Structures are given as structure tokens and as C-alpha cells.
Image: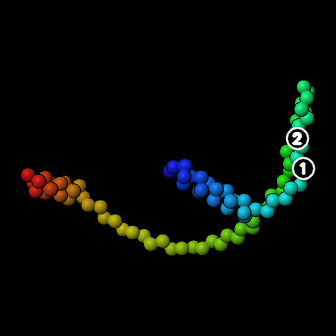
Amino acid sequence: MNIRTLVPISASLLLLAVAGCEVEKTADGDLPDVDVDVDGGQLPEYDVDGPDVDIERKTVEVPTIDIDPAGENDAEAEIEDELERDE
């Protein structure tokens, strides 16, 4: 995958993830004081509520398949026939 396809796909996935959430800013951020003695800053706080998702479960009956593999003698006979045809 090259960069021209990776960037739009990544942007689409990010947009989809952000569009499904409700984000509220609960506190402002502060920049750190710049001194010789630096105090750490504070990142803003957010309260993120994701969407409600309802999941339905369904039971599906899957058919069974009966496979009879060819015997070793049959496979050897086919290979010998092909070798004889090639000669």
C-alpha cells in the first residue's frame, strides 16, 4: 500500500471514529510557566461518551460437507498416467 492510498484511508477511519463520539471539554488546559524552575502544565480534560450499540444474536444452521479424499493408490495412478502422457 503506498502513501497516496494510506493517507485517505487513515483520515476516513479517524473521521469515522470521531464522528461516532460525543466529546465535551470539561476543563481548560494551561501552558507551563517558563522559568529555570519549570512547573508542569495541565492538559485539558474531556468527557467522551461513545454511541450506544445494540447487538442482536442470531443462530444459523451451517450445513456439513462430507468429503471423501482420494486414496493414495488413486493419486499414484493419476500421477503415473500423467507421466506416461508426457513421455
Number of numbered labels in the structure image: 2
Direction left: furthest residue = 87
Q: Is residue 32 visible?
A: yes
State the SS at label 1. loop
The residue at 59%/56% (across/down) is: 8
**Three-letter amino acid code at disc 2?**
Leu
The residue at which mark 1 appears reads as: 28
Asked if the residue at tag 1 contacts the one at tag 2, i.e. Cβ–Cβ closer than 8 Å, the answer is no
Q: Does residue 5 appear to the left or right of 67 in the view shown?
A: right
Q: Residues within 10 Å of mark 2 (few under 14, many from 20)?
A: few
Whether residue 5 sits left or right of residue 24 in the image: it is: left
Residue 39's spot in the image, x, y percent? 90, 33
- The residue at 72%/64% (across/down) is 20
Image side of residue 79 versus residue 57, left or right: left
Q: Nearer the viewer, residue 31 or 81?
A: 31
Q: Position of residue 27 (x, y in %)?
A: 90, 51
State the mark number for residue 31: 2
Whole-percent x, y for residue 30 in the image: 89, 43
Please name the residue shown 10% across and 56% down the image.
Answer: 85
CA gap, disc 2 to disc 1?
Answer: 10 Å
